[in-house]
Image (cartoon, grey):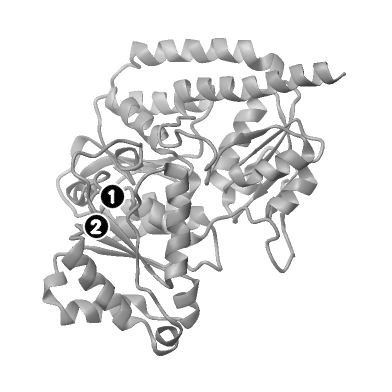
Amino acid sequence: MVTVTTSKKAVAVNPLKQSQPLGAALAFLGLKGMMPLFHGSQGCTAFAKVMLVRHFREAIPLSTTAMTEVATILGGEDNVEQAILTLLEKSKPEIIGLCTTGLTETRGEDMEGILRLIRQRHPELVDVPIVFASTPDFRGALQDGFAVAVESMMRELPQPGAVRPDQITILASSAFTPGDIQELQEITAAFGFKAIVVPNLAASLDGHLADNPSAVTNGGTTLAELRQIGCSVYTLAFGESMRRAAQILEERFDIPYEVFPQLTGLGVMDDLLQGLMDLSGVPVPEKYRHQRRQLQDAMLDTHFYFGRKRVSLALEPDLLYSTACWLQTMGCEVQAAVTTTRSPLLEKLPVESVTIGDLEDFEQLAAGSDLLITNSNGAAVSRRLHIPLFRLGFPVFDRLGNGLRCTIGYRGTTQLLFDIGNLLLEEEENHAHRR
């Protein structure tokens, strides 16, 4: 039985988690023609935008209702209305993603009621989808905000229609990078499926030069694709936080679903390919049989460096579960597990205890480990403890190529084995020279 401990500190001394609005904005950025809109102060929006730009090194569309002290006291309805009308006039988004922040949630504004009144006053907004996500900063973390945004999309945008036997829906959690999603698309296409991926970060934040620069996202899931999701024959949800979104599709359109909590590792990838083979009737392509043999060889080559290593992790719950379970299959011991928010997965982790806390908690628990795995904010902890750091999660601002990084499937797992294995190998050699 895993013991889940919540830190009782009054403040986060060395913060690990990111806010819910930031997570919702990340999900919205996976839709084409999107303009995320924060209902809060300019500072809230600027902070989130800086974090996204530093991680992806791309231009990030993000707007604000620019709440002031007076507007916060009197109510932000006028700010929301003016922001939406200004965006339509200047940026012309195909869809708007509206997120609340701690500032406006504390006041307790009825956002859905405000949106209804704004639509009544402006008939030109009838055909403009505005997806609303309640994302207070003072509760939850990035993963929660991301999940809430995807649930709102699934509740508001898909429409019913005739079932298309070759169409499936993929719901990918915040644990999946644009490179991971690109890999998922290739895998499902190899079995003859047309996959509608939500949110499709692979088409918007994979790091490519656009032919026509735009004030809104120039790639991602299109509005037409979102409408067609009600016609899908099956939903594949990747990450436990996507379970509720998949349930919404089942409730609305009677679409069956399956949740895959992780896709890093040999056995879990076997399970996905078996599921796709059963669903399509298409045998596993030779390409993936060969990648499987490559992964087996990589496991043989690297197991000397992974066996009995003590690894400490500080990640969002979905990514923590995936990484911890995979490391255990490689013979590692998870010495410390720190995360940002509650999740049903925490009680299934291969550890005795997990802490919901910050990087200060992580530093205390991780002393004596052989390897740290967390985001770039853990670099200072790594230097103080003299333990190597493998950067994973969000944000990673001191390494390049986050848009194309892949850590899932046979190919991604193989690359992850080599990346971490080389780090452990280098540390062993350094330790030998220090003797």
What residue sits 72% from the left and 44% below the top?
Answer: 381
- For the question of whether residue 113 can be seen, the reply is no
Q: Is residue 389 left or right of residue 222?
A: right
Kindly check if marks 2 and 1 are in contact, taking CB atoms under 8 A apart as contact. no
What residue sits 62% from the left and 11% below the top?
Answer: 300
- For the question of whether residue 234 can be seen, the reply is yes
Point out residue 352 in the picture as x, y percentages from the top left corner. Answer: 75, 43
Q: Residue furthest right?
A: 435
Point out residue 93 in the picture as x, y percentages from the top left corner. Answer: 21, 59
How far apart are the two marked residues, 2 and 1, measured between alpha carbons?
12 Å
Q: Residue furthest bottom?
A: 74
Q: Is residue 106 left or right of residue 172?
A: right
Check the image and report above or below for 225 versus 49. above
User: Which quadrant would residue 133 be assigned to in this image?
Assistant: bottom left
Q: Amino acid at mark 1?
A: Leu
For residue 157, which numbered disc appears in the image?
2
Check the image and report above or below for 136 versus 413. below
**Quarter placement of the C terminus:** top right
Check the image and report above or below for 102 versus 144. below
Kind of element beneath mark 1? loop
Q: Nearer the viewer, residue 187 or 175?
A: 175
Q: Which residue is mark 1?
A: 31
Q: Earlier in the sequence, mark 2 or mark 1?
A: 1
Kind of element beneath mark 2? loop
Q: Nearer the viewer, residue 258 or 415?
A: 415
| 10 Å crowding of disc 1: few (<14), some (14-19), many (20+) | many
Of badges 2 and 1, nearer the viewer stands 1
Point out residue 89 in the picture as x, y percentages from the top left corner. Answer: 16, 67
What residue sits 42% from the left and 64% below the top?
Answer: 45
Q: Amino acid at mark 2?
A: Leu
Point out residue 293 in the picture as x, y percentages from the top left corner. Answer: 48, 10
What residue sits 64% from the left and 29% below the top?
Answer: 327
